[in-house]
Image: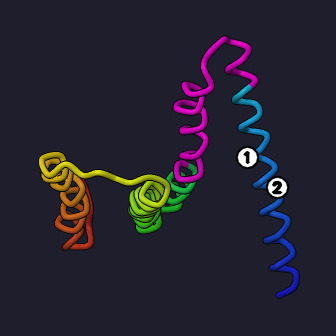
Amino acid sequence: MIVTIFVFLIAMIVLLKGADLFVDSAVKIAKHFHVSDFLIGLTLVAIGTSLPELANAITASITNNSIIMLGNITGANIINLCFNMGIASILITVILNKELLKREAIFLFLGPLLLLLFSIDKNISR
């Protein structure tokens, strides 16, 4: 138990240091190529934050554990939607337009419903 906690703490320290180095490197790249930090944030940092899901999906695909890949994608989408909308709602007042809400809500619920529909027989294929 103590070894597991120790390994977890070391992994968290390495992860935090790696993320710090990644952000610093992205800023240096932006300054070197005279690109705005905002653009680098949209590209490099967005790719960097998606790499763990990509690595998980590739590993699950190679080992024929497609359920892990499906759970990873679904969980990442749920947390991204809920976390980002929650943080935005805490930080600023979100003003909703009824027409925009109607249009966007269709797509917000259509994805999970299609996933549920396609996975009813416990087999998702093309």
The part of the image, by quadrant, that contains residue 2 is bottom right
Amino acid at dot 2: Val
Q: Are marks 1 and 2 in contact (CB under 8 Å)?
A: no
Residue hosting label 2: 14
The part of the image, by quadrant, that contains residue 120 is bottom left
Tell whether 33 sits left or right of 66: right
Mark 1 crowd level (few <14, some 14–19, many ≥20, 10 Å Cα): some
Residue farthest along the bottom direction in this orientation: 1
Instruction: Report how far apart the C-alphas of labels 1 and 2 lie in the structure.
Output: 9 Å
Magenta extent: 28-54
Residue 36 screen position, x and y as percent:
60, 20
As helix, strand or loop, the secondary structure at mark 1 comes to: helix
**Camera-nearest residue between 126 and 17:** 17
Amino acid at dot 1: Ala
Q: Is residue 64 visible?
A: yes
Tell whether 77 sits left or right of 20: left
* Count of numbered labels shown in the rendering: 2
User: Is 23 placed above or below 35 here?
Assistant: below
Mark 2 crowd level (few <14, some 14–19, many ≥20, 10 Å Cα): few
Residue 42 screen position, x and y as percent:
52, 32
Mark before the other along the chain sequence, 1 or 2: 2
Magenta residues: mostly which secondary structure? helix
Q: Which mark is residue 59?
A: none
Tell whether 109 sits left or right of 20: left
Q: Is residue 69 visible?
A: no
As helix, strand or loop, the secondary structure at mark 2 comes to: helix
Quarter of the picture holding the N terminus: bottom right
Residue 85 screen position, x and y as percent:
40, 57
Q: Image point 79% across, 63% down: which residue? A: 11
Residue hosting label 1: 19
User: Is 95 placed above or below 63 here?
Assistant: above
